[in-house]
Image (cartoon, helix red, strand yellow):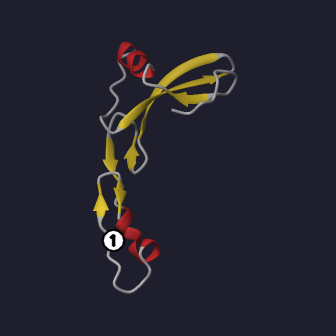
Amino acid sequence: GLATPPHLGSYYNSKANHRYCVDLGLNCHPYSICIREEFNHTISYSCQCNRGFSGNGSYCTDINECVRASELCPYPGQLCVNELGSYH
């Protein structure tokens, strides 16, 4: 996770957060993480989709990066292949 220490306005993730999300009844999608946020001395938890996925954290879908294939693979003969959470 991010190494930001807990303080005003911090935003970080750790495996321990998963327990808090479960205890709070948050249903994080398998392709998301539980995020702990602190702002104005108030702690909250939420689900956030992993990189390469979009959604609200409770539901995450793969982003098809290859819809931008001309940007990602601009040279002749290159083929963009979408993968779960990534591309090559």
* In the image, residue 11 above or below residue 70: above
Q: Residue furthest bottom?
A: 76
Give the side of residue 12 with respect to residue 54, left or right.
right
Q: Residue at x 29, y 58 (%)?
A: 83
* Location of mark 1 (residue): 80
Classify 87 as above or below 31. below
User: Could you tell me which residue is drawn at 67 percent across and 27 percent down?
Assistant: 9
Task: Classify residue 28 by image quadrant.
Answer: top left
Q: Residue furthest top?
A: 23
Q: Give residue 68's quadrant in the image.
A: bottom left
Counting labels gives 1
Q: Residue at (31%, 48%) from the top-left corner?
A: 61
On the rendered image, what quadrant is the C terminus found in? bottom left
User: Mark 1: which secondary structure?
Assistant: loop
Residue 25 position within the rendered picture, expressed as x and y whole percent measured from the top left: 35, 17
Residue 47: x and y, percent? Answer: 42, 31
Q: 6 or 57: which is nearer to us? A: 6
Residue drawn where x is 63% and y is 29% of the image: 4
Quadrant housing residue 63: bottom left
Please give left or right for residue 73 compared with residue 10 in the image: left
**Residue 76 rendering spot, x and y as whole percentages:** 38, 86
Q: Residues within 10 Å of mark 1 (few under 14, many from 20)?
A: some
Three-letter code for the amino acid on which mark 1 is drawn: Cys
